[in-house]
Image: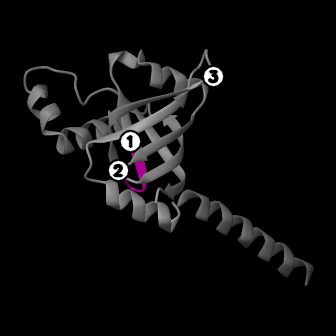
């Protein structure tokens, strides 16, 4: 009987870990609704001031996550702020998302994100033909933890 209890406890832990990886259904629905938008507002916490800083940036929704990129070799304020405090707020349409950022450095991940941006944004694709770096910034994966809707 004790072995059965240990087995059940182990299964519960496995299920909890597995469910943490999948986005909540309401997050998936909201992300599907904003998928085709151009800009999302990202709010980071200032690394020096501790105050919220918001700015619009391009984004791609992929596999239940939001992908963004920093130009200027990562010297943008929002990117540097995110490195210190990875918790961010995203706003698009009537949705407000609470998310956590993770810098992507694996070359395969970086190329995948660049390809997604070049596919979504015609401007980036056209400018890439003349050597522009638009759409080829430092990628960040934002895992959305919750969503709320403004009414």
* C-alpha span from label 3 to label 2: 28 Å
Where residue 59 appears, x then y in whole percent? 33, 41
Q: Secondary structure at mark 1?
A: strand
- Mark nearest the camera among 3 and 1 is 3
Considering every residue shown, the one lying at the far right of the view is 2
Location of mark 3 (residue): 50
Q: Is residue 64 magenta?
A: yes
Considering only vertical position in the picture, is 17 above or below 111?
below
- In the picture, measured across the screen, residue 37 lies left or right of residue 48, that is left
Instruction: Point out which mark residue 111 bears.
Output: none
Tell me, yes or no, whether the two marked residues, 1 and 2, touch with CB atoms within 8 Å: yes
| Residue at (51, 56) in percent of width and height | 147
Instruction: Point out which mark residue 67 bears.
Output: 1
Q: Residues within 10 Å of mark 2 (few under 14, many from 20)?
A: many
Considering only vertical position in the picture, is 144 above or below 87?
below
Residue 73 lies in quadrant: top left
Q: Secondary structure at mark 2?
A: strand
| Residue at (91, 84) in percent of width and height | 1
Confirm whether residue 118 shows in the render. Answer: yes
Quick one: label 3 or label 2, which is nearer the N terminus? 3
Residue 39 lies in quadrant: top left
Residue 58 lies in quadrant: top left
- In the picture, measured across the screen, residue 13 lies left or right of residue 30, that is right
Q: Nearer the viewer, residue 90 or 18?
A: 90
Q: Which residues are magenta?
A: 62-66
* C-alpha span from label 3 to label 1: 24 Å
Q: Residues within 10 Å of mark 1 (few under 14, many from 20)?
A: many
Location of mark 2 (residue): 61
């Amino acid at each position: 009987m004790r072995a059965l209890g240990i087995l059940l406890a182990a299964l519960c832990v496995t299920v909890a870990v597995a469910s943490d990886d999948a986005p909540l259904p309401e997050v998936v629905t909201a992300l599907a609704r904003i998928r085709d938008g151009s800009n999302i507002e990202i709010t980071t916490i200032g690394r020096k001031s501790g105050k919220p800083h918001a700015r619009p940036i391009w984004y791609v929704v992929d596999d239940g996550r939001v992908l963004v990129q920093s130009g200027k070799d990562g010297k943008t304020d929002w990117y540097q702020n995110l490195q210190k405090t990875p918790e961010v707020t995203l706003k698009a349409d009537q949705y407000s998302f609470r998310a956590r950022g993770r810098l992507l450095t694996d070359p395969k991940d970086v190329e995948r994100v660049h390809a997604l941006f070049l596919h979504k944004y015609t401007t980036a694709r056209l400018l890439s033909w003349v050597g522009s770096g638009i759409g080829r910034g430092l990628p960040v994966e934002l895992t959305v933890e919750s969503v709320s809707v403004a009414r």
